[in-house]
Image: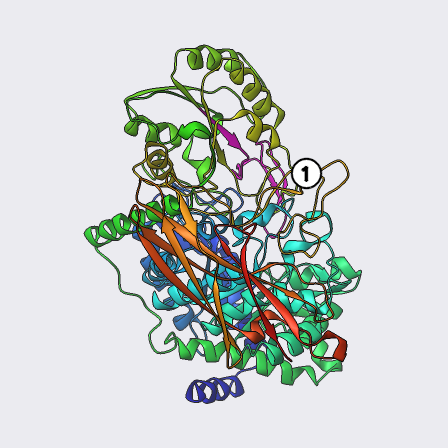
Amino acid sequence: MYQAFKQAQSLTNSMALREKLGQITQTVAGYRCYQKNGQQFTWAPEFTKTVEYYGGIGAISGLLRSDPWTKRGYGNGIEMEQRVEMANRLQTYLKQNTRLGIPALIQIEASHGMQSLGSVMYPLGICSAASFQPELYQSMMQLVGQEIRQSGNHIAFVTMIDLARDPRWGRSEECFGEDPYLAYTFAKNGTTGLRQGGALVCAKHFCAAGCTEGGINSADIHIGLRELHEIHLPSAKGAFEAGAEFVMVAYNPIDGILCHTNRHLLQTVLRKELGFHGVVISDGCGVSSISHNLRCSYESAAVAALNAGIELSLEDQGAFATLEQTVQQKPELVEKINAACTHLLEAKFECGLMQQPLTQSFTAEQLSALQTKRNQKAYEMAAQSAVLLKNNNNLLPLSNQTKLCLIGENADSVYYLLGDYTSERKPQEGASLRRAFGERFKNLTFAMGWRFNGQNKGESEEALKAAAQADVICLCLGGSSVRDFEAVYAKNGAIESSTNFMDCGEGCDVADLNLPPQQLNLLSRLKALGKPIVALLIQGRAYAISQVAEQADAIVVGWYPGQQGGYALADVLTGAVNPSGKLPVSIPASGSALPVCYDLSTANRGYTNLKNKALYPFGFGLSYTQFSYQKPELVLENDVVTATVLVQNSGALAGSEVVQLYAQVHGDGALHGRRLVGYQKVQLQPSQAQTVTFTVPVKALNLLPQADPAFDPVLVEFFTGGGSNCSLSGSVTITR
């Protein structure tokens, strides 16, 4: 590390000011760097002029990106077989056309697979977290990391710091749920996996983006220091402990101070308290947006961001470009520019980019084998993440001979299974629910039933006729993160308006957590038929589903399960897979009863007109078998609590259970909610029992420092079971 720093420092000292600014200012997005005519690529003037002006480019984002925002797809984008060629051509161009020949770091969105043509789209974060298997997530992200480096890219942009504390927030789908410990473990394992695959990791977004006012993206956040440290920082800590090399700053302000200009947040909290030593990146257009938000000049925005600790301005709209002139009046900024440039170059030396900027290509046979492996992992994660919420009279599993009627627009296209930040798909890349169910069930009929746009052109009547002839109805419900090419996008890629129905994803925050009325109306009409109904929820957030819970006989939450999710969910319904997923978010009883997070000190307090705020609590999930628990046995020794839990499969089928341990502190002078402190998924045969052991350091309980003898000793109650509402408990007394 020291050697890399010295090399980077020496190189920085040899650079002109503009060359340094070229390293820390990303002005041209990767997808705009090239033009494609047939199968021939040429560099766009925007790219060549930028290289000439700055004498190089430090980093470039989205060279391989494909989606409606970039307007890149099959026909005008970089396909899988062309990735390495284009990455190598870019590095060669920089080497041959700049004085110093410094290669560029190439970045790609990769929260659920590379956002590029041909890449496998895995389950989104909220879906993966429902597996409660961070080790499985690690192996999945290792494959993503391998694909990134095998494609000539370097940095994975991954949403792993944010928490889904408000289900109205459109980006809830990207998060690992509402709980800080669950997010900590997934962020840590996900970072580990990506780095094992060879990718550098940019963890985003720092911080607290998931609890804005009203769930509105980038709105203000009002949190205290305890909430910041206990809830919003653990996920970042997990990513940093695993070696994340970059962190992306969030758009939102905290208590009115933009994260991009918050010196205390980026220097004291991030650097000193969390010990982050990597590179701090702005979010897309983040530095330039300071000017808009604070009604100040680009010059002021650039200085404020640089002084706060921003080292690389992503998709800069002209703010950092002003620094070349600003240093004439503020020469002290040169030192900060030098430090930022050195830091970025150090990352290039450490990852071997400076030594070897080119990437070896793969044969078609090798690429095919890798795709098969990735699809298998995508299926496994989707299968482990499905959550069974209700199963009256053991309706599920169904025989594959069942005469099943599948209903819903979101069952008719694989895109509805993928979520936001998804590249264009070919028909053979994944399977819709309709296609997958058709391969699993021998007597399947399909009816559209409802459409997202609410226009009923006889679809509901056709669905009622088809359902009347079936033994069981599977009604697909939920939302959509499907982007379209006609939508209007902000400069950073967020949705501003769309001709498609889109109620989830970046820029798609909602005031109403109810499902679309056309879906609920059809559910009521189907209920009148007297047929058993399975409600299959395809969603990226927690909807308020009280009507569904009342009228459906079985409920399965499939989330956005990725391109193999159709097969995984079909196997859950047939019993080929025994569901073992647990809720990573609480399901609200009403869209008005917010916040609904289980770990609030008021979590179990209802309203006069609503008994419980949560319809289904965090950690809840059924199985086709049953599990029984004994009270935890607790031992406190050397400031560590050891909890031993005995769990048994008391049912007739083999299955997996997520054994969960919660702690609640009483009597330290502060209000504490119940908080997850340990979990482990175990697989058990019928009648098989297993002892699960958890170790919980006292410091992890977040006890207040002793301030008053009246609040000592402290009682800590531990609960165990298959969800946050578990009741089996024991306690220990801790003297501070």
Mark 1 lies on residue = 591
Q: Main secondary structure of the magenta part?
A: loop
Please determine whether, in this image, residue 304 is positioned above or below residue 253.
below
> Does 354 lie within the magenta span?
no
- Residue 27 position, x and y percent, is 57, 62
Please determine whether, in this image, residue 52 is positioned above or below residue 121.
below
**Residue 119, visible in the rendered structure:** no
Please determine whether, in this image, residue 590 is positioned above or below residue 148.
above
Q: Quadrant of the N terminus?
A: bottom left
In the rendered view, does 28 fall on the left or right side of 649?
Answer: right
> Does 494 lie within the magenta span?
yes
Label 1 residue SS: loop
- Residue 357 position, x and y percent, is 35, 71
Residue 393 vs residue 314, the one in the foreground:
393
Question: Which residue is at the far left?
Answer: 365
Question: Please, what is the three-letter code of the amino acid marked with disc 1?
Answer: Gly
Give the residue displayed 49% in from the left and 43% down from the top.
419
* Crowd band around label 1 with a 10 angstrom C-alpha radius: few (<14), some (14–19), many (20+): many
**Residue 701, visible in the rendered structure:** yes
Residue 299 vs residue 682, the one in the foreground:
682
Give the residue displayed 76% in from the left and 81% down from the top.
329
Indicate the quadrant where residue 200 lies. Answer: bottom left
- Residue 263 position, x and y percent, is 70, 75
Indicate the quadrant where residue 565 lies. Answer: top left
Residue 719 vs residue 20, the one in the foreground:
719
Magenta stretch bounds: 474-502
Q: Quadrant of the C terminus?
A: bottom right
Please determine whether, in this image, residue 472 is positioned above or below residue 367.
above
Question: Which residue is at the far right?
Answer: 295
Give the residue displayed 73% in from the left and 51% down from the top.
213
- Residue 133 position, x and y percent, is 40, 56
